[in-house]
Amino acid sequence: MRIQYTDYQHYGTVVTVRKDLKGKHREHCLCHSCVLFHPGDFEKNCKIAQLLYTICMIHNIVTPVWECPRFVERPQL
């Protein structure tokens, strides 16, 4: 199967993404299932997640985290 790509506007910048992965960041990223993840709260947020977010904003990229030494699973609701 040939991998397909698409371009779209992401925070005002045109970016390229694999079509099969578009919109799946949260589904794949450990951060969204971790008790240490507090986006928007610089003081409480995981320092690794905060640094990665800063890099993503500077370079207009999206980077899911698949492995992390600090991961603590958030209880399921």
Image: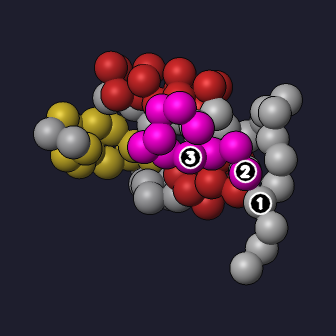
63 drawn magenta: no
Magenta part of the protein: which range?
A: 35-44
User: Image height check: is 76 above or below 48?
Assistant: below
Judged from the image, the secondary structure of the residue bearing numbered disc 3 is: loop
Mark 1 touches mark 2? (CB < 8 Å): yes
Within the image, what quadrant is residue 47 found in?
top right
Q: Kindly tell me whether residue 72 is visible in this rendering.
A: yes
Q: Say which label, 1 or 2, has the lower sequence index.
A: 2
User: Image height check: is 56 above or below 33?
Assistant: above
Nearest the viewer among 65 and 24 is 65
Mark 3 touches mark 1? (CB < 8 Å): no
Residue 45 % position (x, y): 58, 37
Question: Which amino acid type is shown beneath numbered disc 2?
Answer: Cys
Question: Which amino acid type is shown beneath numbered disc 1?
Answer: Arg
In space, the residues marked 3 and 2 are separated at their CA atoms by 9 Å
- Residue visible at 59% across and 32% down in the picture: 49
In space, the residues marked 1 and 2 are separated at their CA atoms by 5 Å
> Around disc 3, counting alpha carbons within 10 Å, would you say few (fewer than 14), some (14 to 19), or many (20 or more)?
some
Question: Which amino acid type is shown beneath numbered disc 3?
Answer: His
- Residue visible at 85% across and 29% down in the picture: 69
- Residue visible at 61% across and 60% down in the picture: 27
In space, the residues marked 3 and 1 are separated at their CA atoms by 12 Å
| Residue bearing the label numbered 3 | 38
